[in-house]
Amino acid sequence: MFRWSRFSAIAYKEFIHMRRDRLSFAVMLGIPILQVTVFGFAINTTVDHIPLVVCDLSNSKEGRDFAQRLVNTSYFDLVGWVDSYKSAKSYIDHEKAKAAALIPENFPRDLRRGEAQVGVLVDASDPLLASSALSTVAQVGLIMNIEIMEESGGGAGLSSPAIDVRTRALYNPDLRSAVYIVPGLIGVILTMTMVLITSVAIVREREHGALEALITTPVSKIELMSGKILPYVVVGYVQMTLVLMVAWLMFDITPQGNIAFLYSVGFLFIVASLGVGMVISTIAKTQIQAMQMSFFFFLPNILLSGFMFPISSMPEIIQKFSQILPLTYFLVFLRGVLLKGTGPAELWPYIWPLLIFAPAIVTVGVLKFSKKLT
Amino acid sequence: MHFLEAQNNASPDIEFVIEVEGLSKRYGDILAVDNIEFNIKKGEVFGFLGPNGSGKTTTIRMLCGILQPTSGTGRTVGFDISTQSERIKEHIGYMSQKFSLYDDLTVIENLRFYAGLHSIPKSVRENRIAQVLERAGLQDRRLQRAGSLSGGWKQRVALVCSMVHQPKVVFLDEPTAGVDPVSRRRFWEMIYRSAEEGSTFLVTTHYMDEAERFDRLVFIDKGKLIAQGTPEFIKRTEFRHKLWEIKCQPLSTAEEVLRHSPDVIETSLQGVTIHVATSLQFSDVDSLVGALTRGGVKVESIHETVPSLEDVFISLAAGNNEHTGELT
């Protein structure tokens, strides 16, 4: 029989531990703020401000116009203007530039004929940067081509909208990484802190010798577990709120969907993460072991859940594996609610797995915990 | 509802608070507790003596219902330790060797925590806590963090935590280990007072000088129960030698000399004297003194003495070792 007095005694004690352990408390609140700031600014998968050197052999108005257009995209910063292929390459060799645009001698003439070519040299030691540079130059060339065709009246059929990928980027019109990263961070931060905190919860009592006294009282396993979980549900909500605040204040990301909906599904994920920590806590013998197991759980979550890399580009077997991680579902949910304002009906496929996982993992934790010693 | 609960929680009317029959616990090849039997009556302060690793803690854990016995039966407050362990937990208090206090909680917070775990009604909780604090002389320290208390105070807090719900039996595992003599004395006073009010205590210790404090006791060595009864009874029945107390110098030489004497069965150092066990027929004191003097020992006095429990246990433990063919 569930006794409120025993449950609240455990929960109250955990609150005191939390309040008295200033360092851990600061870490619990500091992690969300710090991580969002650092991750939001530092993880940048769109590459811009690539140092560019231009080698204009044509020395023409058209050549300078083309170079200017490249710089105008803000994907490039002009760092040099040279007149030979050799010196352009030496810019790249000496790490002064990452890309070079080579404009041939008869660029203006070829341009009018519609057969202009531009050479691009890229330092491909960073593939992400290389592909970004190549596609930008290609786009600029394409746009320029179309404009010239229109001017010369040669292609009425091509006056339809120019192919500009950026105008088609939904929900994140500027293609900012922060917009993609920050909502996911709510899930990642919750996974990390919730699992880590609870994984040591039971082990700490055991190492300290208090567990023996606890299990000789009438407190039931459910009272013990839920009493230990409750304070951290509160912490989880505080962390979620902090991330949302930072997202809003620093990255101008405001939730498009229903906040109440966000917080209620958030509860499922918080409980799921705490449950994983509980299970670890019943298996681990020492706090060190518990922490190692937490990190072991954390790593696939951060790499395979779709937080860093799109799941669709993973091998099939890894995709299957990512489907057992609660974070995979929660991330889709978070991006849906925060960026697109998607509602429960559309997100249901990502909610019900959490609805099953959360109570299941807590049940495993309760069953695995024993009021007997071995 | 209340009435029903009260009936449910009441343990059967019993003469013995603890009954143990043929209880054993095996860990792999090691028999930690080997077929022990004893009973404890209501209101007794019952001692569990033995060297470290003799199976005392294992036995207590089984009686508290947190360790499943390998074989044998036991009943605590009338409930079976293997099948009704959760019922037992409503009626017992347990103070483990590590004191199990939360260092970052204050004294009163620790007490409230255990009071909550035992569902002491809110209406009486604060009164009860104030009462136990006063009895333990802890009022002035009630707002102090448990971690900042010295060993003796910690022990007292741990004791009241295990008793705040007025349990029928209190298990104290090595409660006086590492605590100064003054604190130990106060601690025992608290236990006697509670026992007079009807609580039953099972206390383990490896301090032999505490043995005389128990109403009854058992002596356990290597998992085997090798003596039980009142201190007087054990001294009378278990010590089958004559005991002599010799005051002499230097003690180490004396011990060496006496060990080689054919009349001496055992020797043990007791402060500035040496205790020597001989057969009951032995009376030739002069030959002992002679041997000592020849060995260069200056003998001040020698006389027959009443064995202490410590003497009895040393002799019992020695006997048990001989029995199992082991060297001390």
Image (cartoon, coloured by chain):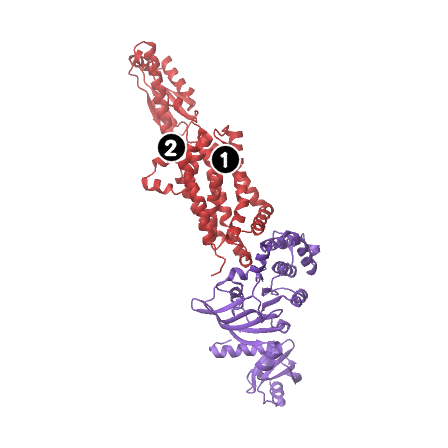
Chain colours: A red, B purple
Across and down, in percent, residue B233 comes to 60, 79
Relative placement, left or right, of A203 versus B181 is: left
Q: Between residues B251 and A346, which one lies in front from this camera angle?
A: A346
Q: Between residues B286 and B239, which one lies in front from this camera angle?
A: B239
**Chain that bears disc 2:** A
Question: Mark 1 or 2, which is nearer the eye?
Answer: 1
Q: How many neighbours does mark 1 have within 10 angstroms: few (below 14), some (14-19), or many (20 or more)?
A: many
Across and down, in percent, residue B285 comes to 63, 88
Helix, strand, or loop for circle 1? helix
Identify which residue is drawn at 47% across, 36% down: A185
| Mark 1 and mark 2 residues within 8 Å of each other at the beta carbon | no
Q: Which mark is residue A158?
A: none
Residue pointed to by mark 2: A126
Residue pointed to by mark 1: A36
Q: Between residues A237 and A106, which one lies in front from this camera angle?
A: A237
CA–CA distance between discs 1 and 2? Answer: 25 Å
Amino acid at dot 1: Val
Quarter of image, res B309: bottom right
